[in-house]
Image (tube, rainbow, N blue to C red):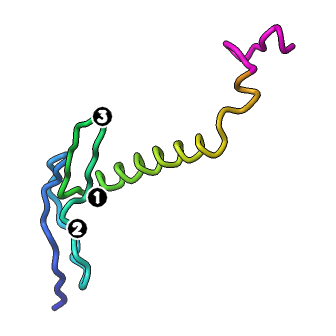
Amino acid sequence: MARRQVLEIRCDRCSKVETQDIKPGEEKPEVALLVTFQGESVEYEDLCRRCQGAVEGYFKSMTLQSKKDEEEGPKEEELKSRFLGGRNRSTG
């Protein structure tokens, strides 16, 4: 008979209860997510797979956007355009 060890968790974000595999030799971090925004901090110890995916997506989206902004800055075309894609009269 095959056996596997699992860990039952209750997600701190959505309260869903699910089982997750315990991988041999891998330790679970004490804090899965620590968020600090405008002086307020929220800490999550357990996240379900769905919430882990959502958090990963949010994180990638935020960090990619900030990296693009730092690398490129505003484009010249964006600076020259105005409402509804029209152009400033002074620039033609």
> Of helix, strand and loop, which mostly describes the magenta segment?
loop
SS category of the residue bearing label 3? loop
SS category of the residue bearing label 2? loop
Q: Is residue 44 above or below residue 28?
A: above
SS category of the residue bearing label 1? helix
Residue position marked by numbered label 3 in the rendering = 38
**Nearer to us in this view, 10 or 72:** 72
Residue position marked by numbered label 1 in the rendering = 49
User: If the image is split into quadrants, where does the C terminus sit?
Assistant: top right
Q: Is residue 4 above or below residue 31?
A: below
The answer for how far apart the CA atoms under marks 3 and 1 are is 27 Å
Q: Position of residue 86 (x, y in %)?
A: 75, 13
How would you rate the neighbour count of disc 3 (Cα within 10 Å): few for under 14, some for 14-19, many for 20 or more?
few
Which tag, 3 or 1, sits closer to the chain's start? Answer: 3
Q: Position of residue 32 (x, y in %)?
A: 24, 59
- Callout 1–callout 2 Cβ contact below 8 Å: no
User: If the image is split into quadrants, where does the N terminus sit?
Assistant: bottom left
Residue position marked by numbered label 2 in the rendering = 29
Which tag, 1 or 2, sits closer to the chain's start? Answer: 2
The answer for how far apart the CA atoms under marks 3 and 2 are is 25 Å
Residue kind at label 3, given as amino acid type: Gln
Q: Which residues are magenta?
A: 80-92
Residue at 20% across, 52% down: 44
- Callout 3–callout 2 Cβ contact below 8 Å: no
**Nearer to us in this view, 84 or 36:** 36
- The label nearer to you, 3 versus 1, is 3
Residue at 23% across, 56% down: 47
